[in-house]
Image (cartoon, grey):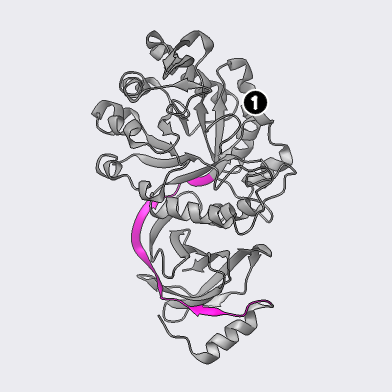
Amino acid sequence: MMSSVKKPICVLLVCFTMLSVMLLGPGVTEVSAASDATVNISAERQVIRGFGGMNHPAWIGDLTAAQRETAFGNGQNQLGFSVLRIHVDENRNNWYKEVETAKSAIKHGAIVFASPWNPPNDMVETFNHNGDTSAKRLRYDKYAAYAQHLNDFVNFMKSNGVNLYAISMQNEPDYAHEWTWWTPQEILRFMRENAGSINARVIAPESFQYLKNISDPILNDPQALRNMDILGTHLYGTQISQFPYPLFKQKGAGKDLWMTEVYYPNSDNNSADRWPEALGVSEHIHHSMVEGDFQAYVWWYIRRSYGPMKEDGMISKRGYNMAHFSKFVRPGYVRIDATKNPEPNVYVSAYKGDNKVVIVAINKNNTGVNQNFVLQNGSASQVSRWITSSSSNLQPGTDLKVTDNHFWAHLPAQSVTTFVVKR
C-alpha cells in the first residue's frame, strides 16, 4: 500500500458486416475489420492462482456477511474472488478481527495470505532515513523474534480455522513513510537467515513499484532464494515495459510470481463506476498476465468507493472488469498463448482449465470490432460469452458456434468480453 490514505484479416463479406451491424443494437454505426486472434491451446505459460483483494478491518471496517458472499461467491452478482489478502497487526490482540472474513473466503475455496506493515513496537527502533529521524526499522537483534511473530500469526489463524496459504515478510519496505523501512540488504539478511523458520510459504519483498533492486539480491542468493516461495510485488506507477522480469525467469524456477496489491488507474473518491476509465482495470490485468506473467492479481481494498465493491456492497464497473477474469479464470487454470494485440486497442489473453478455454478480449476503440478467433491444437464446439460495456455488466450474449476451429465475435466499442469455449 502506498499510504494509509491511498495515493494515488480478413476482409469481411458485405452481407456479414450488414448482419453484424443489425444485431448490435441501437447506436452502433461502424464496424471495423480485425486480423485473426490465434489461441494456441497447447502453448502453456503460467499457472494462475487467482484474483482478489484486501480486507483491512482495522482501518476501514470488516466486510459484512453479505459483502463476503458478494466478494467470494461465484454466482450471479458475485465477484468470484479466489484470493484474499489480510493484515498482520503488530498488536496480537487485534488478530481476531481477521478471522471471520478469512474463514468465509476459505469456505468458498479462496486462498488467504497475510502481509505485515510493522513488527511489534518492542522490536522497532527509529533511525534517520533521508532526514526523517522518526523513521522505523526492525532492530537488528530482533530478526529471529520477528520471524516467530509471523509464525505466531500463522498458528493463530490456523487455530481459528484458517490455514494461511502464505505470509509476507513486509508490505512495501521501500515506501514506508508510515510503516517500517527495510533496505535491500536487510531484506536479504532476513530472507537468508530467518525466513526459513516460518511455517508457511513466504512472500517477499512486496516492493511498491516492482523495483528490481529490492528483489534482485534475493534471486542472486541461493539460500535466500530457497527461503522465498513467492516473489510478490505491487505495481503502483510501474510502467508496462517494467512488467517483465528476466532475472526471475532465469533464477526463479519453482517459485511463484504474484502481484499482491494495486489500485488502477487512481483512487479518486467515487470513481469506481467511471466509464470508460474502468476499462483500464481489465487492460491492466491483461498486461499483468501477458507481459508480467503474474500468477495472482490482488486489488487493494475490496470495498471502497474506487474499488471492485462500492461502500454500499454493490459491484462497481471496476469490479465487473475484474470479474471478467476472476469468475472464469479459476485457480489452477493455465495461461496459453494468444495473439495479444490483434488490432490497435484490442487486447486478448487466453487460459485453459476444466476442459474449457477462457478468452478475455478488451476493445478500447470507440467503434465495434468483428474479431475472428482461431483455435490451434485443440477442438471446440460452442462458445458462451459475457460482455461489460457502458450499458451492460457481465451481460450474457448469444452462444456462438465454432466452425473449422474458429469463430467470429463482435466486440462492442469500449467493452470487455469473456468467452468460454467448451472443448
Identity of the residue drawn at 54% across and 91% down? 15
Dot 1 crowding, Cα within 10 Å, few <14, some 14–19, many 20+: few
Q: Secondary structure at mark 1?
A: helix
- Classify residue 300 as left or right of residue 67: left
Which residue is the site of mark 1?
Answer: 58
The kind of secondary structure the magenta stretch mainly shows is strand
Residue 350 position by quadrant: bottom left
* Circle 1: residue type: Ala
Front residue of 211 and 12 = 211
User: In the rendered structure, which segment of residues is drawn in magenta?
Assistant: 27-51
Residue 384 lies in magenta, yes or no?
no
Residue 45 lies in magenta, yes or no?
yes
The percent coordinates of residue 267 (x first, y second) are 60, 42
The percent coordinates of residue 10 (x first, y second) are 41, 82
The percent coordinates of residue 90 (x first, y second) are 55, 18
Identity of the residue drawn at 62% across and 28% down? 98
The percent coordinates of residue 370 (x first, y second) are 51, 77
Identity of the residue drawn at 42% across and 33% down? 207
Residue 417 position by quadrant: bottom right
